[in-house]
Image: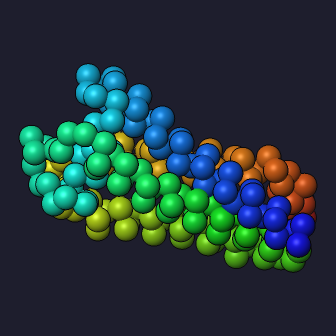
């Protein structure tokens, strides 16, 4: 039971680290561009939940911001839980680290493709580069958290790789 509680808490934290990385990134990006700090979530929430297709029609108020952030947080936490579970499984059966690395790599590629499909209608509203950069930073931050929490596993995997050459 303790093992299960450990990966659940770690997964929650991992997901929240990724989520807040994206939130802070877009907050800074919006302020640097001279926009309202919540411009991007208002834009995405308006487009995804209220059918807005023009930047001039973005809904004002908390509804689109809360709607988008709610979905974004849930998805981030689910990804964090999945990542933590995979890392805990790898600790139990170390040869799985090859599979886990591949899953993380494919997960990042898949998330970029899914974002591309979902954002295709919004391409004229928001550029791809900040979305890619925000996702990459979230992956690095969340992965870094897991990396620090499981330094022994990372060290063993590195030693195993070095021994193969």
Instruction: Please state the horizontal and vertical placement of residue 43, each as a whole percent of the image.
Output: 24, 46
Residue found at x 90% / y 55%: 152
Residue 11 drawn above or below residue 18: below
Tally of numbered discs = 0
Q: Which quadrant: the C terminus?
A: bottom right
Q: Nearer the viewer, residue 18 or 160?
A: 18
Residue at image coords 48%, 35%:
24
Color scheme of the displayed model: rainbow
**Residue 12 percent location from the top left of the image:** 67, 57
Q: Is residue 57 above or below residue 47?
A: above
**Which residue lies at the image location 74% right of the left edge and 64% below the top edge?**
8
Classify residue 97 by image quadrant. bottom right
Query: Looking at the image, which is closer to me, 87 or 54?
Result: 54
Question: Which residue is rendered at x = 35% and y = 54% of the image?
Answer: 67
Image quarter where the N terminus lies is bottom right
Residue 61 location, quadrant: top left
Instruction: Residue 85: give x, y in percent of width and height.
Output: 73, 70
Can residue 42 be seen here? The reply is yes
Residue nearest the viewer, comparing 31 with 156: 31
In the drawing, does residue 100 fall left or right of residue 39?
right
Q: Is residue 159 left or right of residue 146?
A: right
Q: Can you see residue 44? A: no
**Residue 117 at x, y = what percent?**
29, 68
């Amino acid at each position: 039971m303790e093992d299960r509680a450990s990966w659940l808490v770690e997964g929650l934290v991992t997901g929240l680290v990724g989520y807040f990385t994206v939130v802070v990134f877009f907050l800074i990006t919006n302020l640097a561009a001279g926009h309202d700090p919540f411009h991007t979530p208002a834009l995405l929430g308006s487009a995804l939940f209220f059918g807005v297709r023009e930047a001039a029609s973005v809904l004002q108020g908390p509804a689109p911001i809360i709607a988008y952030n709610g979905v974004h947080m849930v998805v981030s936490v689910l990804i964090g839980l999945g990542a933590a579970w995979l890392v805990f499984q790898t600790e139990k059966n170390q040869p799985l680290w090859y599979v886990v690395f591949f899953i993380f790599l494919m997960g990042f590629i898949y998330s970029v493709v899914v974002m591309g499909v979902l954002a295709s209608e919004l391409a004229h509203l928001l550029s791809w580069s900040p979305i890619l950069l925000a996702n990459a930073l979230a992956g690095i931050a969340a992965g870094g958290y897991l990396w620090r929490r499981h330094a022994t596993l990372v060290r063993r995997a590195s030693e195993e790789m070095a021994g193969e050459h």
